[in-house]
């Protein structure tokens, strides 16, 4: 990683005070942890993960709504990551109902076609990366026994909330490469902080960090693109059009956050026949937190997984207490995985 070494040398010369940057992507967190990047960064440079795991930011009220659908006899089709996320009365895995793991919305539609007597509901979780595919599926007019519980979220409104709150003293963002592949980075230009779109190789991330730190040190606030092989300013125009043809933004709660204006995606009225909430009369309620889990703080970038007193003790990937230990994009699971791997590796000589 010769390029990486050069970047690290330049970074070290630039960082002579504390600087906190946030990334909003589980894949970035996994890449950072896998490569051990935090251990080689200059001491003052702090990289925190924000609300970048779509399963983790899905609030308990939406998990409870999915459980409610199971209770009503629906076949619930979901990504495997969501299966073990605890709701108020257990998880989808422990519900004892007809819950099936699918790799995507198209697989859920196949179940609905194969089993026309069943009501099939797809738990549609994800950011702007997955919403266009779901939109295309809805536009293809799947069978009437198919619907979705839309749990989609949009990244920029959460960034706006974090900046307005100022809780984590953020000086810049590493923007999510996958989301920006679809959405471009035009809409991030309204934020007056340093931002860099970064890819997922260790060198991509280091380059993104260097570009962001340079902006911080020079007092510049703009969006730069360190991932031009995949991301353009305008993004995938067709995918964006599809998404907004089917969905509309609405105010919604995130786990760890209050209701954030225009941060969720719900089906437009003309597609409400596919809206599981309306079709099955299921409500999504706010649920107060009663456990010692600090996922809320982890998702806002004000605590690290290792700050949680349950981390690696009462809470492990086998016995998850919060969603951040369930999803493969969750910070707690990622930290647990790579910390335990490091602990079992022989020391480097
Ligand atoms: Fe929640 Fe477990 Fe993470 Fe603690 S270690 S914040 S309990 S998911």
Image (tube, grey):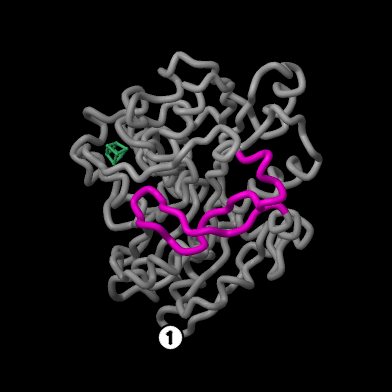
Q: Is ligand 1 less than 8 Å from the beta carbon at label 1?
A: no
Q: Over which residues does the magenta segment extend?
A: 246-275
In the image, residue 21 sits, relative to residue 142, either above or below, namely below
**Which residue is at a point 74% across and 24% down the rendered structure image?**
110
**Which residue is at a point 52% across and 46% down the rendered structure image?**
27
Quadrant hosting residue 257? bottom left
What percent of the width, then of the height, locates residue 289?
26, 42
Residue 6: in sight, yes or no? no
What percent of the width, then of the height, locates residue 142?
77, 34
In the image, residue 187 sits, relative to residue 279, either above or below, namely below
Q: Secondary structure at mark 1?
A: loop
In the image, residue 62 sits, relative to residue 97, either above or below, namely below
Which of these two is toward me, 128 or 231?
Answer: 128
Left or right side of 89 for 140: right
Is 159 inside the magenta-drawn segment?
Answer: no
Q: Quadrant of ligand 1?
A: top left
Left or right side of 287 for 248: right
Q: Residues within 10 Å of mark 1 (few under 14, many from 20)?
A: few
């Amino acid at each position: 990683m010769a390029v990486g070494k050069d970047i690290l040398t330049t970074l070290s010369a630039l960082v002579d005070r504390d600087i906190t940057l946030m990334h909003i992507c589980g894949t970035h967190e996994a890449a950072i942890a896998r490569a051990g990047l935090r251990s080689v960064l200059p001491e003052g440079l702090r990289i925190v993960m924000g609300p970048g795991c779509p399963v983790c930011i899905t609030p308990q009220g939406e998990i409870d709504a999915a459980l409610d659908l199971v209770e009503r006899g629906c076949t619930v089709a979901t990504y495997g990551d969501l299966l073990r996320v605890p709701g108020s009365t257990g998880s989808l895995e422990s519900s004892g109902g007809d819950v099936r793991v699918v790799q995507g919305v198209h697989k859920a539609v196949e179940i609905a076609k194969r089993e026309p007597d069943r009501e099939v509901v797809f738990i549609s979780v994800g950011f702007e990366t997955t919403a266009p595919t779901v939109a295309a599926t809805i536009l293809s007019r799947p069978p009437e026994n198919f619907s979705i519980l839309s749990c989609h979220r949009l990244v920029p409104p959460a960034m706006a909330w974090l900046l307005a709150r100022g809780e984590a003293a953020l000086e810049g963002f590493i923007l999510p490469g996958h989301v920006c592949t679809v959405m471009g980075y035009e809409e991030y230009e309204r934020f007056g902080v340093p931002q860099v779109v970064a890819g997922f190789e260790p060198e991509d991330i280091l380059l993104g960090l260097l570009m962001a730190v340079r902006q911080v040190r020079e007092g510049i606030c703009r969006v730069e693109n360190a991932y031009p092989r995949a991301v353009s300013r305008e993004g995938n125009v067709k995918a964006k059009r599809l998404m907004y043809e089917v969905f509309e933004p609405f105010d919604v709660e995130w786990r760890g956050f209050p209701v954030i204006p225009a941060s969720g995606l719900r089906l437009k009225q003309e597609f409400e026949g596919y809206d599981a909430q309306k079709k099955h009369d299921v409500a999504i309620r706010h649920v107060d937190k009663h456990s010692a889990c600090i996922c809320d703080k982890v998702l806002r970038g004000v605590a690290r997984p290792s700050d949680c007193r349950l981390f690696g003790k009462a809470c492990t990937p086998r016995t998850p207490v919060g969603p951040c230990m369930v999803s493969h994009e969750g910070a707690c699971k990622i930290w647990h995985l790579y910390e335990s791997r490091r602990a079992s590796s022989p020391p480097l000589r």
